[in-house]
Image (spheres, rainbow, N blue to C red):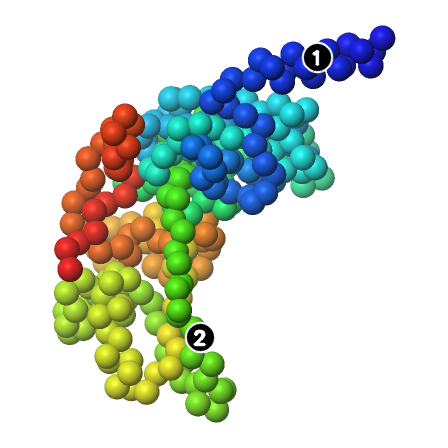
Amino acid sequence: MKRLQRALYAYIAEVSERADIRVGSPLPLGTHERGGGVNFAIFSRQARRVRLELFDHPEDAVPARVIDLDSARNRTGGVWHVWVEGIGPGQRYAYRVDGPYEPSAGHRFNFNKLLLDPFATAISRLPTWEFGLARGYDPSAPDGDSVPSMVNNADAMPKCVFTQEHFHWHEDRLPRNSWSKTVIYETHVRGFTLHPSSGVEHPGTYRGLMEKTPYFKELGVTAVELMPVQEFNANQVTGIHPQTGQPLRNYWGYDPVAFFAPKASYIAVREVWASRSWSSRKWSGPFTRPASR
């Protein structure tokens, strides 16, 4: 009888599934366009509940849409997954994940905290980004991290951005220089061309770095090694400059928050894009328009 009830439950769940939300696939991880929608997949072996939240604006505290994943249908092993129809480039999203809160065992699940997708290829920008609000524990508790925080940090957290970027390398090939003929130039994307003496049109950006290609060749450089170019929080430093009184900023970026998302502030920009029209599939405003060549 129990087996029959389970079979009936599974059948009802299958036929009643909303057409624009489906089970999805556990691989690949992250977000990937597939069949008129986007497949979302995130790994969490100890999670008991996972929620996908879709946002219209970077600073929104309330999502425009919430999708709770079913542990019986939207989970394969330790991967939670769902397919959502009609998602286009520029869509902002994030997760909430619930599970055991046992710091002594390494588990600090807190459903009040908005989480970034580890495989996100871009995150939205905020004027200020307060890391303190992302703490899963209550800092006022007398005994460390034993008490979970009840603060919802959605409005203080950037959101992931679906980009649908598929770069084709075409006929590009590695130079295959021997080590005896290899000259490596290590530099910082922003610092390398920020000063006017660099003579580039787009200082402090990826494009400015590209403008210096003839310079690298003149030096005999065969490989350029870049300091971190992944997204990081430049405002995480709490110190104050002793001479100017201004807050110090993280310049080097050696503690990235999204390994697959290039640092957006290094992009050559001209103006913020207009708000996205979902009906016409136009870009939204998490990014900025590239400067003209």
Under tag 2, what secondary structure?
Answer: loop
Can I make out residue 45 in this image? no
Checking the image for residue 174, the label placed there is 2
Which residue is pictured at 44% across the width and 59% down the height?
Answer: 254
Task: Check disc 1 and report the residue beneath it.
Answer: 9
Q: Which residue does the image show at 56% across and 32% down from the upper left?
A: 24
Viewer-nearest residue: 237 or 79: 79
Mark 1 vs mark 2, CA separation in Å: 55 Å
Classify residue 222 as left or right of residue 38: left
Where the C terminus falls, by quadrant?
bottom left
> How many residues crowd around disc 2 within 10 Å: few (fewer than 14), some, or many (20 or more)?
few
Q: Quadrant of residue 58?
A: top left
The front one of 157 and 170 is 170
Q: Residue at x 51, y 36 (%)?
A: 40
At label 2, the amino acid type is Leu
Q: Secondary structure at mark 1?
A: helix
Q: Earlier in the sequence, mark 1 or mark 2?
A: 1
User: Which image quadrant: the N terminus?
Assistant: top right
User: In the picture shown, does residue 115 fall above or below 70?
Assistant: below
Snapshot quadrant of residue 146: top right
- Asked whether the viewer can see residue 166, the reply is yes
